[in-house]
C-alpha cells in the first residue's frame, strides 16, 4: 500500500515572532506518511523571509503580495498535491504525532472524508490558557450533529484535515468572508458527510490580544451568525439560539479581557 501524502498549507504575513515555532512543529512530524508542506507568504517585511530561508531545502515557500489570508490559503489549497489536505496558521503549532494520528484515521476509515481533533489554547509564550474553551469544544465534538454545528462552531480549524476528493467537490474558501471562513467551510463539508472525531490533542491555537481572533472576535461572531443562516438556520427559534450562544460567548470574552486589564500578571 502506498504511503498517504498529506499536504499542509501555512499562510503567512509578518509573523516572524511565531513562524519558526510553527514550522518546527510541522517538520518534526514523523510517521507512515509523506509530507507536502508549503508556506504562502504575503511579502512580509519583518524578518519572516530570513527565517524561511534558514530552512534551506527542507521547506517549500513563496513570498509575493496577496489579497489576504483567504487568498493565500486558497492558492495553497489549489496547488496541494496530497491525498489529504489541511492548513495551519503561522502562529499555531501541531502537537507531536498529530499527522501520524491523521494518517492512521484515514487509513482505518476509508469511508471518512474529513477529520478533526482536540486543540488546546496557548498564549504568546506557549503557556496553556483558556482550558474551559478546549473542554467546551471537546464536549460538543463528542456529541456531533449537523444541527449542533449550525448552532455553535466547536471544530478547531488547525486540527481539520480532509480528502482531496472532498475539496474537489466543495471548492475552496469563500473569498468574501474575512473572519469565519473556516466555519463556513466546515458547514459545506458537513452537508456532504459527518467528520470523524480524533479524541487526541492534534494542535495548539495561539490566542493573544493582537492576533486576528483576539482583536476581532465580536466581528467574527457577526459573520458566524450570517454563515449559519446561509446554511440552514432560518427559523426564528433557530436564529435566537444561535444569537444567544454568540452573545454569551462574547460576554465571556469581554469578561476575560476586563480581568486581564485589572490583573495583568494573570492569564
Image (cartoon, rainbow, N blue to C red):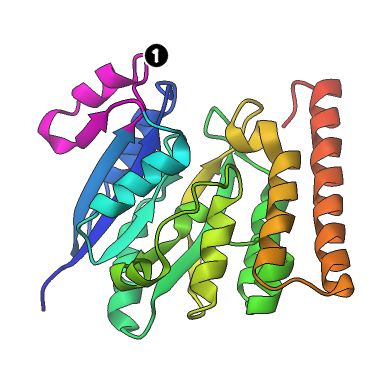
Left or right of residue 179, residue 257 in this image: right
**Of residues 53 and 95, the one drawn nearer to the viewer in this rendering:** 53
Q: Quadrant of the N terminus?
A: bottom left
Spot occupied by residue 130 in the image (x, y as percentages of width and height):
69, 45
Q: Residues within 10 Å of mark 1 (few under 14, many from 20)?
A: few
- Quadrant the C terminus occupies: top right
Above or below, comparing residue 231 to residue 261 in the picture: below
Which residue occupies the extreme top position in the image? Answer: 46
Give the residue furthest to the front.
176
Q: Identify the image quadrant of residue 171.
A: bottom left
Q: Nearer the viewer, residue 120 or 219?
A: 219
Q: Mark 1 sits on what residue?
A: 46
Nearest the viewer among 189 and 196 is 189
Say if the magenta span includes residue 51.
Answer: yes
Q: Is residue 170 above or below residue 97?
A: below
Name the residue located 26 percent from the left edge and 55 percent from the top edge.
Answer: 7
First to last magenta residue range: 41-65
Q: Position of residue 109 (x, y in %)?
A: 35, 83
Q: In which quarter of the view is residue 135 placed?
A: bottom right
Which residue shows up at 49% across the image and 71% down it?
189
**Horizontal and vertical percent position of residue 68:** 46, 34
Near-viewer residue (128 or 50):
50
> Residue 197 at what x, y percent from top left?
50, 73
Q: Is residue 58 above or below residue 34?
A: above
Q: Is residue 249 among the parts visible in the rendering?
A: yes
User: Is 41 on the left or on the right of 255, as rendered?
Assistant: left
Q: Disc 1 on helix, strand or loop?
A: loop
On the question of residue 143 being in view, the answer is no
- Which residue does the image show at 19% across and 28% down from the upper left? 55
As displayed, is residue 124 above or below residue 163? above
Amino acid at each position: 500500500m502506498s504511503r498517504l501524502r498529506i499536504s499542509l498549507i501555512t499562510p503567512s504575513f509578518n509573523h516572524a515572532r511565531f513562524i519558526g515555532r510553527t514550522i518546527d512543529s510541522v517538520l518534526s512530524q514523523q510517521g507512515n506518511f509523506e509530507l507536502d508542506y508549503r508556506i504562502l507568504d504575503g511579502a512580509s517585511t519583518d524578518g519572516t523571509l530570513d527565517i524561511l530561508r534558514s530552512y534551506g531545502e527542507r521547506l517549500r515557500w513563496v513570498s509575493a503580495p496577496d489579497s489576504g489570508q483567504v487568498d493565500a490559503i486558497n492558492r495553497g489549497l489549489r496547488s496541494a498535491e496530497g491525498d489529504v489536505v489541511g492548513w495551519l496558521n503561522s502562529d499555531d503549532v501541531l502537537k507531536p504525532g498529530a499527522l501520524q494520528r491523521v494518517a492512521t484515521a484515514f487509513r482505518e476509515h476509508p469511508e471518512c472524508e474529513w477529520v478533526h481533533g482536540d486543540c488546546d489554547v496557548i498564549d504568546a509564550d506557549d503557556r496553556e490558557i483558556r482550558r474551559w474553551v478546549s473542554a467546551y469544544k471537546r464536549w460538543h465534538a463528542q456529541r456531533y450533529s449537523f444541527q449542533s454545528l449550525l448552532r455553535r462552531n466547536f471544530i478547531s480549524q488547525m486540527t481539520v484535515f480532509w480528502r482531496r476528493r472532498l475539496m474537489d467537490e466543495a471548492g475552496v474558501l469563500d473569498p468574501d468572508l474575512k473572519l469565519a471562513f473556516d466555519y463556513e467551510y466546515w458547514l459545506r463539508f458537513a452537508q456532504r458527510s459527518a467528520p470523524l472525531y480524533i479524541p487526541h490533542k492534534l494542535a495548539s491555537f495561539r490566542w493573544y490580544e493582537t492576533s486576528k481572533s483576539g482583536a476581532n472576535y465580536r466581528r467574527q461572531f457577526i459573520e458566524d451568525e450570517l454563515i449559519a443562516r446561509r446554511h440552514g438556520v432560518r427559523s426564528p427559534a433557530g436564529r435566537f439560539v444561535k444569537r444567544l450562544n454568540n452573545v454569551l460567548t462574547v460576554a465571556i470574552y469581554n469578561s476575560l479581557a476586563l480581568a486581564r486589564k485589572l490583573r495583568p500578571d494573570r492569564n
